[in-house]
Every structure is written in structure tokens, then in C-alpha cells.
Image (cartoon, rainbow, N blue to C red):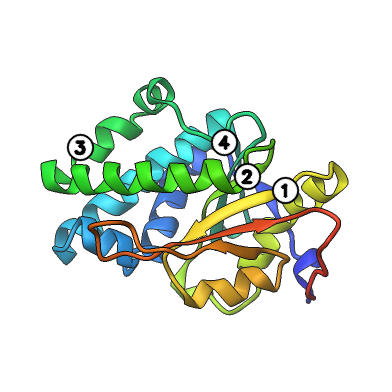
Amino acid sequence: MTEKSKAIIRLEMHQLGQAAQVLGRAFQGDEGFEYIVPDEVRRARLVPSFLGRVISYCLLYGEVYTTPMLEGVACWLPPGNTRPTYTRMLRTGLLTESLKFGWAGFLKLMYIENYLEKIHRHSVPEPHWYLWWLGVDPTHQGQSIGGALMQPVLERAEAEALPCYLETDNEANVLFYEKHGFRVVSNDEVPEHRLRFWAMVRVAGRNIMST
């Protein structure tokens, strides 16, 4: 079964709790979250809750896709709304949830987010789609679900001649995204922090989609 033939649906609000757990499991071993919340037990509790607020934000101000069995989640922000605002983060509980990382963790998160925001602005100053978060439950990884979850927006962006943008702190993900037309535009370390992020852009009309 090809990625384009997989059933992809919009996530509904009543699925929020399950989606948060799926995304939490997908990012439990993420290097960025390990840096922000070193304690594994606290991380297992805090990360799904934090990502649940991210999903809430995208349900209100963007688009969220999943599969009928909720094996993965893709959170997009649309052109004109690709930079989360403090007002909206407060409304969705995302800002409050960030504080639960503790003061040290919160400061790390804010520093990293501010740095990535500068890279984001520089990389795609024009209207674009932002793949804010994409994760597949570890028990379903390697089944082309991640690629399928991106397809609705990638196809729309292609039709509208709009670029797409994302960041990842996992070098292993770079090849995966490259197969879907993204190209690295930045891979610098965050100053004063031991984290490296790859910023990637997909330009409409210049991509060969893998199957």
C-alpha cells in the first residue's frame, strides 16, 4: 500500500487525549525533551500533556491529521498563522503547560524556541505551511504512516504553489523528509545549548514525491 492510498482523516476534539499519548510516546526519547526534562519519569508525565496543548492549538488555529486507528499525528499551522502567539498559547493552555517543566526547563524551552523562531523567519519569510509536529506511535513506525500523514497538506501546498517548513533535532529524520521533497536550509547548534536542529523547506514545483 502506497502512502497516498492510506486513509488519512482530520483529528477531532474528542480524540485529543489519545492523540496526546500517541505523540508523547513518539517523542519520549526526543533529544530536545531529554535536555529540557532530564528525569525520565517526569518526562513521561509532562511531555504528553505538553503535546496535548500543542494539538489543541493546532485544532483551533491550524490542522491536525491522523489515521482511523490513530497511529500517528501531524500538526500543521497554515499560511499567515505559522508563528504561535502568546495570546493563543495562553488560551489553549500551552504557555501554562510549558511552566510545568520547571523554571530551568521553561527557560531552556523559551531560549530554544526563540532561536528557532529566528531561523524560521529567515528560512521562509513568504507565506507557507509549517509542519509544527509529526509523530508516529513507536509500535507503528516504519509503516509509511508518517509520510502519509503529510500528504493532505503537501498536496495542497503544491497546488497553491506554497512552500512548507519544518525543524527536527533528529538527524535520522533528515533523509525521511528529503524523500518527501524537503531540503536542509540550516543545521546549526543552538548557541550555549548542546542541541542541533535541522531546518528544512519544501518548495512547490521542485519536488519528486517518493512512493
Of residues 203 and 8, the one nearer the viewer is 203
Q: Tell me the element at label 1.
A: loop
Q: Which mark is residue 124?
A: 2
Cα separation, mark 1 vs mark 2, equals 8 Å
Q: Circle 3 sits on which residue? A: 99
Mark nearer the viewer, 2 or 3: 2
Q: Which mark is residue 82?
A: 4
Q: Tell me the element at label 4.
A: loop
Cα separation, mark 3 vs mark 4, equals 22 Å
Question: Could you tell me the amino acid type at mark 1?
Answer: Pro
The answer to whether residue 178 is above or below residue 118 is: below
Residue appearing at x 61%, y 74% in the figure:
176
Question: Could you tell me the amino acid type at mark 4?
Answer: Thr
Of residues 196 and 70, the one nearer the viewer is 196
Mark nearer the viewer, 1 or 3: 1
Dot 1 or dot 3, earlier in sequence:
3
